[in-house]
Amino acid sequence: MYRIGLTGGIGSGKSTVSSYLKEMGYNVVDADQVAREVLDIYPEILGFIRRRFGQEYFDEKGILNRRKLGDFLFRNRERLAEYESVILPLIKKEIFRRMEELENSGASICFLDAPTLIEAGMHKLMDKNILVWVDRETQIERVAKRDSMDHGQVLGRISSQLDIDKKKEMVDFVVDNSAGVEETKREVREILAKLGIFKGAI
Ligand code: ADP
């Protein structure tokens, strides 16, 4: 199976590209979705969060408030590192289990959509990697609008990731998502054609 990593910075348009790939019928493993689902697969993670960070990250029904935990962790780098040391190995394990499942079912191509593909070193396990890129100003504006965050909250999340311009040097293809979505989709089709895996008309 041919494995293609898809990454970006927060708000660069990775989910927009990922949805387009799914629409066209490609298999996409979504690391964010896995990150949410590992909490169900490994309930001990919730126990760890409760013990280590406190009950205040859960509502009265015991449901984790991911947004509140995120706000806390992105302001406390040591705690973020501690949280990631517990959760990242489980996320990676589940991602590769899902990819293996796809391969065993006969899939010939699979995308891995992961915001921290490069930070987690998973890009090295892919055959090719694609980065969805936008300039910093656009990135901040789009996240602030999408997630109703102020610029401080957005910057906290951006600075927890490797600089998007550094990521450019570590991938095989860059999609510039600064213009409209239609232009982005055209660039994606071009990359797929270069990889020899696009069957439609460009
Ligand atoms: P990511 O998955 O990288 O965090 P998204 O795909 O969610 O980013 O895009 C961030 C926000 O910007 C979303 O609200 C999305 O609708 C919007 N967006 C994405 N691409 C474009 C574009 N080319 N032009 C305008 N808005 C866009």
Image (cartoon, rainbow, N blue to C red):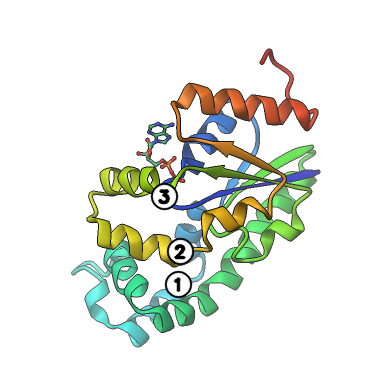
**Circle 2 sits on which residue?**
40
| Disc 3 secondary structure class | helix
Give the class, few, some or many, for how many residues have Cα within 10 Å of label 2's Cα (few <14, many ≥20): few
Q: Name the residue type under label 3.
A: Arg
Viewer-proximal residue among 113 and 151: 151
Quarter location, residue 63: bottom left
Q: Is residue 20 above or below residue 99?
A: above
* Dots 2, 1 in contact, CB < 8 A: yes
Give the class, few, some or many, for how many residues have Cα within 10 Å of label 3's Cα (few <14, many ≥20): some
Task: Judge from the rendering whether residue 27 lies leftward or rightward of residue 160; answer left or right.
Answer: right
Q: Earlier in the sequence, mark 2 or mark 3?
A: 2
Q: Earlier in the sequence, mark 3 or mark 1?
A: 1
Viewer-proximal residue among 21 and 38: 21
Could you tell me which quadrant the C terminus lies in?
A: top right
**Circle 3 sits on which residue?**
136
Ligand 1 under 8 Å from disc 1 Cβ: no
Quarter of the render that holds ligand 1 = top left
The residue sitting at 58% across, 49% down in the picture is 7
Give the class, few, some or many, for how many residues have Cα within 10 Å of label 1's Cα (few <14, many ≥20): few
| Disc 1 secondary structure class | loop
Distance from label 2 to label 3 (Cα)?
35 Å
**Circle 1 sits on which residue?**
43
Distance from label 3 to label 1 (Cα)?
37 Å
Residue 17 makes an appearance in the image: yes
Q: Is residue 79 above or below residue 163?
A: below
- Give the x, y percent position of residue 66: 33, 63
Distance from label 2 to label 1 (Cα)?
5 Å
Quarter location, residue 27: top right
The residue sitting at 75% across, 38% down in the picture is 109
The number of numbered discs placed on residues in the rendered structure image is 3
| Disc 2 secondary structure class | helix
* Dots 3, 1 in contact, CB < 8 A: no
